[in-house]
Image: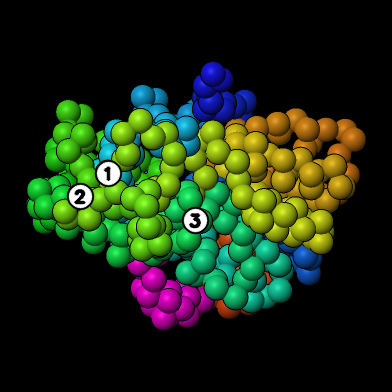
Amino acid sequence: MVVPRIPYTLPFPPPTIYPSHAVTLPAAIAAVTDFLHSRNTVLLTGAGISIESGLADYRGEKGTYRLNNKYRPIFFGEFAGSHESRKRYWARSFLGWPTMENARPNRTHMAVSNLGELGVVSHVVTQNVDSFHHVCHPKLPTTELHGTLRTVTCLTCHSEHPRIPFQKTLARLNPKWADFLQTAIEVGAFNKNNREESIKTNPDGDVDLPGAPYTKFRYPPCPKCLEETHNGTVLIDNDGAHIPKPDDGSMKGILKPNVTFFGESISEIAKKEASKAVEEADNLLVLGTSLATYSAWRIAKAAHEKGMGVGIINLGGVRGEDLFFSSDARGERIRIEFASGDVLGGVVKELSGIDHKALDTANEDTVKRAGGIGLGG
């Protein structure tokens, strides 16, 4: 059996800034403003833009895989094929969910919303599963390339279900875990400033507790499959927790987060949406991603091969930068190494003539109308 691997765990080479004078924030803002001015641009975003919202990133500033190099996400085959692996995953996800639910979009998401309203950005393709784009600019077309954590989906019937009620069901089935989570929240264990007692949330929104009794965790089956089964295909205990059938390797009634795991293919719908957006655009601007995953890399590569303008704003190296800035590259190129919120905030001010703080206030109202929080909306 071929074991899926995590791509590009070693550092990427440092970037070459382009234009070369864009080494100060004002110069970087000017370069990006010129790149975006009156153009049909698609954004390709990654985990780096959500760090300011308090979420973890996969890579450090040099592109090295995860600051905690011992972190290893679950692979699709593990989740689909093992009841014990699912118990472990849902226990960790149960503990990490409040951090995801309570996180808010940040300056970058708000600036993207402004750029959409200004007619500069036509589409967003994001690798992120935090739904911040979905909340912050619902009218700007957004393709969630790797899915979203705001719903769970069934591996059998493919029905989708909201995560918040699912979280409540996990709490009901696992009262001791629920008590632990509530206590951890009350004492500030998820507060990053509480260094002695801090519990860290991983990039996938889960929490690892070494030595925790994951094997005792329980999770429910798909309610639709349970309702429709007439032959005992989906089994539950007296409390409604899923019971796998003995010697049954099927995936009937199994719920998974509506995201693309490592070792799993992205959805054809998302792939086609992203390809169509790039095909119809003039420029591609990469934000907060090292392009280490193939799904993101192929989008940037397609833009390059089409002769589109390609811009990159990222702290640290990016996969295949030499390709984008090679002598045969067609279309405009920019490479900026500043935080995306600093750069795009300045760009919005330049293009609109309105102070970014005033726009932030308006965007905060948009977020509140959408539910006030990222995934909780």
Q: Earlier in the sequence, mark 1 or mark 2?
A: 2
Quadrant of the image containing the N terminus: top right
Q: Earlier in the sequence, mark 1 or mark 3?
A: 3
Which residue carries the number 3 mark?
157
Q: Position of residue 251 (x, y in %)?
A: 44, 42
Kind of residue sitting beneath label 1? Ile
Q: Is residue 139 above or below residue 124?
A: below
Q: Is residue 278 above or below residue 338?
A: below
Q: Is 24 left, or right, of 21 in this rendering? A: left
Which residue carries the number 2 mark?
237
Which residue carries the number 1 mark?
243
Q: Earlier in the sequence, mark 2 or mark 3?
A: 3
- Dot 2 falls on a residue whose secondary structure is loop
Task: Judge whether residue 369 is colored magenta.
Answer: yes
**What distance separates the C-alpha of mark 2 from that of mark 3?**
21 Å
Mark 1 and mark 2 residues within 8 Å of each other at the beta carbon: yes
- Viewer-closest of 215 and 178: 215
Labels in figure, total: 3
Q: Which residue does the image show at 62% across and 59% down from the upper left?
A: 143
Q: Residues within 10 Å of mark 1 (few under 14, many from 20)?
A: some
Q: Position of residue 345 (x, y in %)?
A: 55, 64
- Residues rendered magenta in the picture: 358-377
**What distance separates the C-alpha of mark 1 from that of mark 3?**
18 Å
Q: Which residue does the image show at 52% across and 53% down from the upper left?
A: 147
- Viewer-closest of 94 and 86: 86
Q: Which residue does the image show at 22% across and 55% down from the upper left?
A: 240
Q: Which residue does the image show at 54% across and 71% down from the upper left?
A: 137
- Residue 65 visible here: yes
